[in-house]
Amino acid sequence: MLFSQDIGIDLGTANTLVCVRNKGIVIREPSVVAVDVKANPVKVVAVGEEAKQMIGRTPGSITTLRPLKEGVIANFEMTADMLREFIKKAMRGSPFSRARVMICIPSGVTEVERRAVHDAAKSAGARYVSLIEEPMAAAIGAGLPVAEAVGSMIADIGGGTAEVAVIALGDIVTANSAKVAGDSFDDAIVQYIKRKYNLLIGERTAEEIKISIGSAAPYEGEGAMDIKGRNLVDGLPKNVEITSEDIREALSDPVNQIVETIRLTLEKTPPELASDIMDSGITLTGGGALLRGIDKLIADATGMPVHIAENPLDCVVTGTAICLEKDNLNIGRRLK
Ligand code: ADP
Ligand code: MG
């Protein structure tokens, strides 16, 4: 049976994506909320792009935060508020009362937090809510043969977490989740530039540097970039030029932790499935898959072929859409 209002949601630590049946991806916004801390209880005043725009431009009582970043329960109420707003926005103009919603959340969250997400979608008017684990959704969205009797390996490198899993016969066989991903890359860049150049930069600048000249392995046409920050010695603004090589050195620690997580998962994989992965390789999804050379580095470190999925930032939400289309809502059953 087809439901015109099926909605798939990737509730990521960095970005939330929403797709609506027959419309494709309708929301792609940062997982950010702006809250009025003077209100009691604390009130969410804006979400997503709108909240991000408010950073630094708001009266003192309003602050912005990423409710999923740390995954703590206090912020899960804000996560629920954010989710409700995104659903409302995605459904603008259409009645939502019969919709089925499939939501993908980071696998580290607790049972109570899952319940909070589930209830938020219900209270937004969903008729049926199902949750799916991130690596499963990512693997389906990347087009891996998850239902078949062969092993597939997925490594989803997001903002807050990297999730690695081996999947066969529609189930997760082995999995590991590490709290090392895109945010850790940004932090590592901040720390490195502080140490090496006595220069203080913000997280957003660090992310820009990572995206413009960052890499995990040497690449052709490496770049350099002028950055501005605050000199830690005299407190004045200062300019320095940094290179791709600098950033590679800065990122080597967190990148190696991700490689370790992949190695650990491979070690726990039964031999038959491991030999499948030798053939089919490891598929990378999530924004972290876009870090230059990360595929090459993982391939060198593990001896496995590594592929970057097409549109790695969209795989999870696409995975939820495919499940809804196939009426395969039980694949997320493990979360209930
Ligand atoms: P999540 O699923 O946790 O919301 P995403 O899969 O949306 O995370 O990925 C967000 C992360 O990807 C951020 O840390 C962002 O900086 C990083 N990212 C996005 N584009 C690139 C790029 N071109 N190179 C390196 N990192 C990137
Ligand atoms: Mg994600």
Image (cartoon, rainbow, N blue to C red):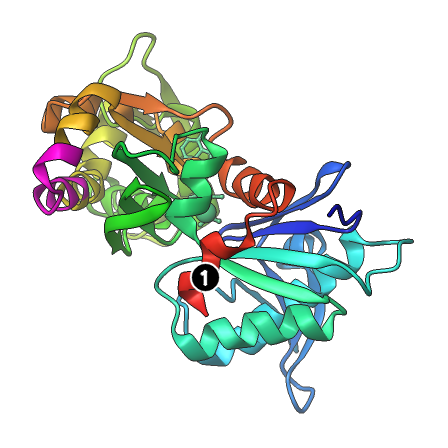
Is 89 positioned to the left or the right of 271 in the image? right
Picture quadrant of residue 275: top left
Where does residue 273 sit, x and y in percent of width and height? 17, 35
Q: What residue do we see at 11% from left, 28% from top?
A: 301
Q: Nearer the viewer, residue 291 or 94?
A: 94
Q: Nearer the viewer, residue 216 or 142?
A: 142
Of helix, strand and loop, which one carries label 1?
Answer: helix
Q: Amino acid at mark 1?
A: Arg
**Residue 265 is inside the magenta segment:** yes
Picture quadrant of residue 31: bottom right
Magenta segment boundaries in residue numbering: 262-273
Q: What residue do we see at 24% from left, 27% from top?
A: 216
Picture quadrant of residue 150: top left
Is 92 positioned to the left or the right of 7 in the image? right
Where does residue 223 sit, x and y in percent of width and height? 35, 16
Is 226 positioned to the left or the right of 217 in the image? right
**Residue 305 is inside the magenta segment:** no
Residue identified by numbered label 1: 333
Q: What residue do we see at 10% from left, 47% from top?
A: 268
